């Protein structure tokens, strides 16, 4: 059933989607508008719940770990906001094609358009959540520094990675439907393994080598969280994330070339 | 203006998965245990929906597709619409494709009429400039009046269809695919809808329409393709094939 002949269908699809990037961004915007329509606060509901979570966890874990709120609260809020973005994108990636089934089965729109739409939608929600961060900084009276500008390349790398990961997950999940549950469990595990609600400094030096460095999510957190906290990420962080970006895109490209034409059949 | 369709030995196999074939866990178990655990049955049935179709459609042809339910009409439309890539065979389609198969696709009940016009037009690939330009005449055509600023979920079925019809017929494709003729609204509106649809067909180069209606085929087609079990049973002019099919 599976065509194994080499073709460039997937790459052509991706280029076509990028060429007409106005469409997915417009669709994502209308997705967000729709959330506002159902309630006055719209996506800010998520912002509020994230804010409440940060306040609760911050006060409890700050006490448990005996870290001053000046350090812990910005660390925790940056971590939770970023993790919310990453995990909701990867979770929604499992249904990225099946939720657009009517469109896919009728209009010859590039399939990658649906991936861009989903990532863009989650990015807009992330921007809604990001406003918590300056509030937290004001609360603990901590300034932003020039290192915060690293946030821009960091976000670019993160978005590139979310795009390839969502594309790959989307392809595999349109074929194997039970992967959605597996994905949720994996993300749950990484939420605890990755330093988000606990600080890496809490680990003994030896353990951190074994727990932190092999965890890809740790490096992605670092390239974004460090700038927010006014620190600069290490070259190891940059190196590993860039490497994952390249390897990931090559993998997603091959997968998409191979299976693009099958996706409509799998839905 | 161009538009050309060539299908060579096109087959379409549609896989039908049961819950076994849909599960990664079961597939993995099946592979790991050499098929002893997990995949008790193949978990996948293949239906050959189009079988060795050879077809050429030249510019300015108006092609009607007839055939009983399950004969492959919709699949053929999906292949022509580049939604399904053939499992084997070659396909060459030149020209922009427009599809009027489900005109309500992409309409969001919570959004207003105007927003939906822009949303649906974006999906169909109609440039925003064109929508801006034609917006007034479009709203007049739908006869929605002030309802155009209300959420679409407050519309009646007729109003909903009028909106969907008006936006969907904004396209100017080279190849137009339709599943049955679109008829919407009351008598008065129907006449105007007919006129609008005819204009759309006039500006397209190739029309492919699947239908069960003899009158429709005889009125607007120059060629009829009779599908049966995914194969072309007959191919010719309506006056020759319609009597055979509809009295069959």
Image (cartoon, coloured by chain):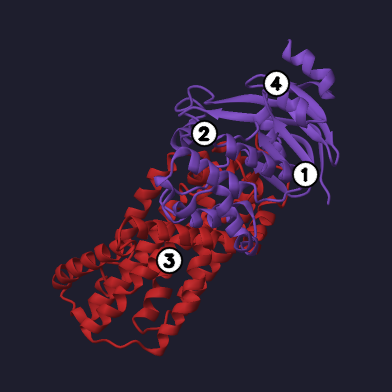
Query: Along the horizontal axis of the image, is A123 left or right of A142?
Result: right
Q: Residue beneath label 4, please?
A: B67
Q: Nearer the viewer, residue B173 or B219?
A: B219
Callouts 3 and 2 in the same chain: no
Mark 1 on the same chain as mark 2: yes
Disc 1 to disc 4, C-alpha distance: 25 Å
Chain A colour as displayed: red
Residue A245 pos. (x, y %):
55, 65
Dot 1, how many residues are within 10 Å of its Cα: few (below 14), some (14-19), or many (20+)? few
Residue that badge 3 annotates: A124
Q: How far apart are marks 1 and 2 (CA)?
A: 56 Å
Q: Residue at x 80, y 44 (%)?
A: B205
Q: Which residue is drawn at 32% across and 54% down?
A: A188
Mark 1 or 2 closer to N-term?
2
Q: How far apart are marks 4 and 3 (CA)?
A: 48 Å
Q: In this figure, which residue is indicated by the disc labeled 1?
A: B202
């Amino acid at each position: 059933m599976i065509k194994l002949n080499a073709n460039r269908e997937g790459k052509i699809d991706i280029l076509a989607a990028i060429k007409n990037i106005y469409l997915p961004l417009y669709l994502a915007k209308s997705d967000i508008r729709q959330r506002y329509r159902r309630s006055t606060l719209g996506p800010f509901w998520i912002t509020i719940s994230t804010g409440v979570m940060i306040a609760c966890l911050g006060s409890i874990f700050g006490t448990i770990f005996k870290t001053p709120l000046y350090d812990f609260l910005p660390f925790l809020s940056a971590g939770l906001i970023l993790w919310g973005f990453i995990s909701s994108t990867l979770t929604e990636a499992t249904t990225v094609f099946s939720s657009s089934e009517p469109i896919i089965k009728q209009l010859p729109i590039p399939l990658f358009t649906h991936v861009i739409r989903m990532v863009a939608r989650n990015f807009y929600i992330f921007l809604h959540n990001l406003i918590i961060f300056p509030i937290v900084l004001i609360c603990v009276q901590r300034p932003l520094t020039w290192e915060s500008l690293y946030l821009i390349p960091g976000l670019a790398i993160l978005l590139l990675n979310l795009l390839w990961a969502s594309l790959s997950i989307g392809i595999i999940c349109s074929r194997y439907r039970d992967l959605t549950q597996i994905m949720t469990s994996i993300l749950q595990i990484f939420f605890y393994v990755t330093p988000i609600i606990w600080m890496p400094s809490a680990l003994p030096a030896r353990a951190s080598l074994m727990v932190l460095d092999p965890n890809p999510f740790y490096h992605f957190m670092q390239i974004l969280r460090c700038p927010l906290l006014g620190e600069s990420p290490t070259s190891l962080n940059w190196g590993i994330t860039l490497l994952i970006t390249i390897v990931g895109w090559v993998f997603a490209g091959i997968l998409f070339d191979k299976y693009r034409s099958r996706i409509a059949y799998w839905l | 203006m161009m538009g050309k369709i060539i299908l060579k030995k096109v087959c379409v196999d549609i896989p039908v998965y049961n819950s076994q074939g849909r599960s990664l866990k079961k597939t993995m178990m099946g592979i790991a245990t050499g098929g002893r655990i997990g995949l008790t049955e193949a978990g996948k049935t293949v239906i050959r929906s189009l079988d060795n179709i050879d077809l050429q459609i030249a510019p300015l042809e108006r092609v009607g597709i007839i055939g009983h339910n399950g004969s492959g009409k919709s699949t053929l439309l999906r292949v022509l619409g580049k939604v399904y890539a053939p499992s084997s065979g070659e396909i060459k389609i030149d020209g922009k494709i427009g599809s009027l198969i489900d005109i309500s696709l992409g309409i969001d009940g919570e959004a207003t009429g105007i927003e939906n016009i822009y949303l649906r037009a974006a999906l169909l690939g109609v440039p925003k400039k064109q929508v801006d330009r034609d917006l007034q005449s479009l709203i007049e055509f739908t006869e929605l009046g002030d309802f155009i600023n209300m959420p679409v979920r407050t519309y009646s079925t007729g109003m909903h269809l009028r909106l969907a019809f008006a936006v969907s017929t904004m396209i100017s494709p080279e190849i137009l695919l339709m599943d049955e003729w679109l008829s919407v609204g009351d008598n008065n509106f129907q006449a105007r809808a007919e006129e609008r649809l005819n204009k759309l067909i006039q500006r397209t180069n190739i029309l492919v329409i699947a239908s069960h209606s003899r009158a429709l085929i005889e009125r607007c087609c120059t060629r009829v393709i009779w599908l049966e079990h995914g194969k072309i049973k007959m191919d010719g002019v309506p006056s020759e094939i319609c009597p055979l099919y509809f009295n069959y």
